[in-house]
Image (cartoon, coloured by chain):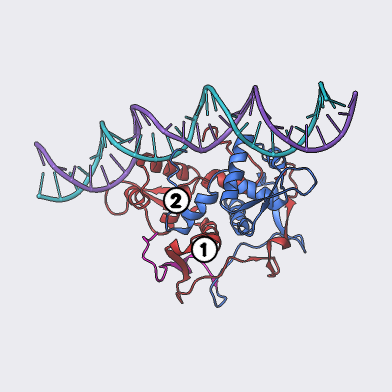
Chain colours: A blue, B red, C cyan, D purple
Amino acid sequence: MVKRTSFEGDACPIARSLDAIGDWWSLLIIREALFGLRRFGEFQSKLGMAKNILAARLRSLVDHGILATAPASDGSAYQEYVLTPKGRGTFPILVALRQWSEEFDDHPEEIATILVDRERGRPIKKLEMHAEDGRLLSPADTMLKPRPASRRRSA
Amino acid sequence: MVKRTSFEGDACPIARSLDAIGDWWSLLIIREALFGLRRFGEFQSKLGMAKNILAARLRSLVDHGILATAPASDGSAYQEYVLTPKGRGTFPILVALRQWSEEFDDHPEEIATILVDRERGRPIKKLEMHAEDGRLLSPADTMLKPRPASRRRSA
DNA sequence: GATGTGTGGTTGCATCATAAAACCATATGG
DNA sequence: CCATATGGTTTTATGATGCAACCACACATC
């Protein structure tokens, strides 16, 4: 994508997130990692992506602290890629993407999987946003405020 | 990015979402639209992006049913871009991205804004995932299930 | 110990989306 | 009637992407 206009220094947290995981593969790699994949070859065969692209993405994800390389695990002297807490912290993002697709996709019948409550096997509810005191909030109930004690440019 | 490996036909809802909004600009445009921007020039000056890219993104977002073009509004014979319900439905995604950045960013002090409860002006809580019966769920409490009555390949 | 095979990459190379700037077309203001 | 602002499209270059081929290492086999 040329230049990439890296959002790294941007003051908007959304832009900052996109800078780390805002490309077409990173989130899919994270999805598979959450699913339990760890090895280069596993990612490669599951996602069907070019190996060089995968190598570049894995390196980038490691650089961003989303994945970490573990020495081995099954004996073979290669490395594995495991999610860090930061990586596991993307779970709500993936859920939000999934739910948006489930709700608004033009062909929802093509969606192969549903996310369910493990205990009951029933679909989970939509993500909820709550105030500090517990009130359920809609988008209209929220607003952006400048961060106290900071003079960076606004977003 | 060449080929783009369009995920449009993929059975994974995350991939399908990414196909629509998984690039570096779309979500930022949506963010500004949620903030109230409507005009080409507003987006352009606020985001500082090249005009041709903006034009292409806006067209793509309209094609995906995320934005719609409104004839005018302030008299000038140009069009405006307004969010559709599908577009407004991305709100949780943006909140998830924001919260991920707030929690895990290496330089959180650079983040300029916080999302607050409009009524109290206090930061909102993290997005919550609930089961149908209301139980709060952690990622480990969930699992993927194949969609009933469908024989598409799994994700 | 030479040979094969599978894993885990790196290295070219062609392509095509991106970005930046110039250009254009249609209002609007003086 | 000219200047300027708005809303784009065209032109050009760049460089990330995708593909295939190549390489290195480990382990197993002959």
For residue D10, side relative to residue C7 (left or right): left
Q: Is residue A27 above or below residue B118?
A: above
Q: Residues within 10 Å of mark 1 (few under 14, many from 20)?
A: many
- Give the residue drawn at x 56%, y 43%: A24
Start-end of magenta stretch: A136-155
Residue at the (65%, 52%) spot, across then down: A68
Tag shown at residue A7: 2
Note whether A62 is above or below B9 in the view shown.
below
Q: Position of residue B32 (x, y in %)?
A: 41, 55
Residue type indicated by callout 2: Phe
Give amino acid for label 1: Glu
- Estimate the spatial distance between the alpha carbons at disc 2 and disc 1, rounded to whole Å: 15 Å
Position of C3 relative to D3 (above/below): above
Q: Which disc, if any, is residue A134? A: none
- Residue depicted at x 73% and y 63%: B141
Residue A131 visible in this rendered orientation of the protein = yes
Label 2 marks which chain's residue?
Answer: A
Q: Is residue A141 magenta?
A: yes
The residue closer to the viewer here, B41 or B87, is B41
Question: On the image, numbered disc 1 is attached to which residue?
Answer: B102
The 10 Å Cα crowd at callout 2, few under 14, some 14 to 19, many 20 or more, is: some
Say yes or no: labels 2 and 1 on the same chain. Answer: no
